[in-house]
Amino acid sequence: EENGYFRADQFSEEGSWTCHFEGTAPEIWQQSDGEIDGFVDFVGSGGTFVGCAAYFVGQSGRIKNYVIEPENAVVLARSAGGTGAHSIQGGGYSKGFDDLPVFDSCLANRGLTPAQLITGGFLTVSDEEAIKMCRLLAREEGIFGGFSAGANLAKAVEVVRRGECKKVAFIVCDTGHH
């Protein structure tokens, strides 16, 4: 602020997850009449995932929360796979949990462990899957999300097809890039 500006650091500001815990997730829960049993999220700063996942866990012990990572930047699942190069904007920054302070902030605030939050596990998505589903959203639904929205849709469909969940929520948070 001393130079007339400030940096809204979504990677470390507590508001990055609390806005989703207090706003986004309750709205999803209400709009779905509490019937969702899964939540998938392509993780960038981690704020959307931890805020929503923490809220959903508090509402129902049956919710499966999945972290999505690009197949070429698998870091959060601790497998350190891939080159880090991918085309999906908004995430896959090759950062581990240690580099995402919003995870620690949320876990400490809500008294949760990572295992209590990531109840569904880790999923990977290819650039091709994300782009294909992004374009499907635009063509079939008129929703102009970006590739991370496509990644979320691809993995929501996958967990439903595998029979792990019946109603999966995900976020379309991009402005679109086709």
Image: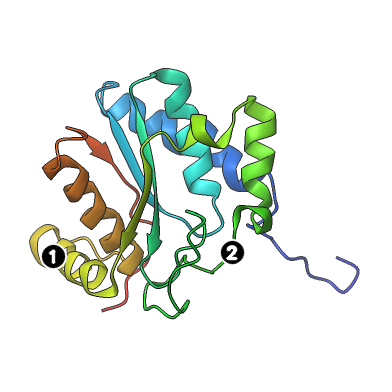
**Picture residue at 50% right of the left edge, 60% below the top:** 44
Q: Position of residue 71 (x, y in %)?
A: 35, 68
**Picture residue at 59% right of the left edge, 59% below the top:** 96
**Picture residue at 63% right of the left edge, 34% below the top:** 107
- Locate residue 27 relative to residue 112 in the image: left or right: left
Which of the two discs, 2 and 1, sits closer to the camera? 2
* Amino acid type, residue under disc 2 in the picture: Lys
Q: Quadrant of the N terminus?
A: bottom right
Q: Please determine whether, in this image, residue 66 is positioned above or below residue 78.
A: above
Q: Position of residue 129 (x, y in %)?
A: 21, 68
Instruction: Identify the secondary structure beneath mark 2.
Output: loop
Quadrant of the rendered image containing residue 134 = bottom left
Q: Position of residue 87 (x, y in %)?
A: 37, 78
In this view, the residue in front, 60 or 14, is 60
**Picture residue at 50% right of the left edge, 65% below the top:** 80
Q: Please determine whether, in this image, residue 101 is positioned above or below residue 118.
A: below
Visible residue check, residue 32: yes
**What is the total number of numbered labels drawn onto the structure image?**
2
| Residue wearing tag 1 | 136
| Residue wearing tag 2 | 95
Q: Residues within 10 Å of mark 2 (few under 14, many from 20)?
A: some
Instruction: Identify the secondary structure beneath mark 1.
Output: helix
Q: Please determine whether, in this image, residue 27 is positioned above or below residue 101.
A: above
- Sequence-wise first label, 2 or 1: 2
* Amino acid type, residue under disc 1 in the picture: Leu
Quadrant of the rendered image containing residue 72 = bottom left
